[in-house]
Image (cartoon, helix red, strand yellow):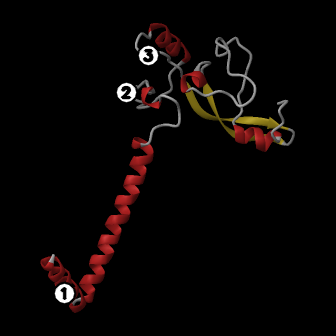
Amino acid sequence: METLIKDIRYAFRQLRQSPAFAGTAIVVLSLGICASVAIFSFVDAALIKPLPYPDSSRLVEVAEIAAMFPRSNLSYLDYLDWKKLNHSFSSLEVYNDSGYLLRTASGAEPVPAMRVSAGFFRTLGIKPLLGRDFFEKEDLPAAPNTAILTYSTWQKRYGGNKNV
């Protein structure tokens, strides 16, 4: 313990004798600590913390990769083939994160949206707050258009009206 105290006193004496070196050391240490915290925060949010769904450790993403398009959208016909031939997963659903133009009385406005297959929310273990989930065949091309609103959209656009 005495050696540690002597080493600390010696370090402070050296820092007082050369303040430019001390300032540089403090700045470099501060930048290193800030960079480490930022990287850990990203890794923690993206890789370590589980997704906010039941059994999130069992969720996987399967993607189609083409030579010219490293991350391309899966075609509907390919999805149907994959679903029919699937023997590895208890559920195989698709999603496409995109935006749409919503027609309103004042014109059109862009809105964020996702196109999902009928079993998407059941796979994630999510139930609608109000209303119903998609029916089994509601994702077929001939099925009528159906939407599930996010809570924030329901509140902002429709004032939380339960009849929407």
Indicate the quadrant where residue 26 lies. Answer: bottom left
The tally of labels here is 3
Q: Is residue 90 shown left or right of residue 36? A: right
Query: In the image, is residue 78 above or below residue 129?
Result: above
User: What element does badge 2 sit on?
Assistant: loop
**The N terminus sits in image quarter:** bottom left
| Residue in the foreground of this view, choosing between 88 and 52 | 52
Task: Give me the C-alpha separation between circle 3 and circle 2.
Answer: 26 Å
Say which residue label 2 marks.
67
Task: Give me the C-alpha separation between circle 1 and circle 3.
Answer: 64 Å
| Residue in the foreground of this view, choosing between 41 and 83 | 41
Q: Residue at x 85, y 30 (%)?
A: 163
Q: Residue at x 27, y 88 (%)?
A: 19
Quick one: label 1 or label 2, which is nearer the N terminus? Answer: 1
Mark 1 touching mark 2, by CB under 8 A?
no
Task: Give me the C-alpha separation between circle 1 and circle 2.
Answer: 59 Å
Residue 22 in picture, x, y percent from top left = 26, 83
Say which residue label 3 marks.
89
Mark 1 touching mark 3, by CB under 8 A?
no
Q: Residue at x 73, y 40 (%)?
A: 153
Mark 1 crowd level (few <14, some 14–19, many ≥20, 10 Å Cα):
few
Which amino acid does the dot numbered 3 rest on? Phe
Q: Residue furthest bottom?
A: 17
* Residue 14: image tag: 1
* Residue 51: image tag: none
Q: Is residue 157 shown left or right of residue 60? A: right
